[in-house]
Image (cartoon, helix red, strand yellow):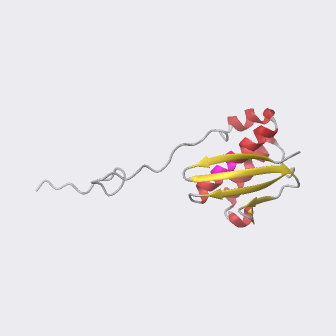
Amino acid sequence: MEMINAIGRRKASVARVYLKKGEGKILINGKDYKEYFPQTHIQYNITDPFSTVEVENIYDLKINVNGGGFKGQAEAIRMGIARALVKLNEDFRKPLKAKKYLTRDSRAVERKKYGKPKARKSFQFSKR
């Protein structure tokens, strides 16, 4: 089996995922995923596509991720892993799509407008 690659995006984060046969090692930007994401709920986000299709500890992952915060990065990685698994086996599409791992969450930060302190917040109104 050759290396399969996929891209996942979320907010300002872009994750490039490279999947190959192995023993379940996940490297994110050269570090182990447990070291890169110390929070356990974020680690679960990354490993959940594998448990959904029941293929834990079969594939090695090498992931390059940049932009955004830790949550956006984790969800971008999750989407990239799900896309790579579907490229590997088309039967994985249905359970991954049911959990919405193949859907791009397009919500992003709204830009700031002129004459306002933030995107929608206004300065205090004074009648007199």
Q: Quadrant of the C terminus?
A: bottom left
**Horizontal relation, residue 86 to residue 67: left or right:** right
Q: Quadrant of residue 25?
A: bottom right
Decide: is 96 above or below 66. above
**Magenta-highlighted residues:** 75-79
Q: Quadrant of the N terminus?
A: top right
**Horizontal relation, residue 89 to residue 112: left or right:** right
x%, y% of residue 125? 20, 54
x%, y% of residue 74? 65, 54
Q: Residue at x 34, y 50 (%)?
A: 120
**Horizontal relation, residue 124 to residue 30: left or right:** left
Q: Residue at x 88, y 55 (%)?
A: 23
x%, y% of residue 72? 59, 54
Q: Out of 38 and 27, give the one closest to the viewer.
A: 27
Q: Residue at x 67, y 41 (%)?
A: 101
Number of marks = 0
* 8 in magenta: no
What secondary structure do most residues of the magenta stretch adopt? helix
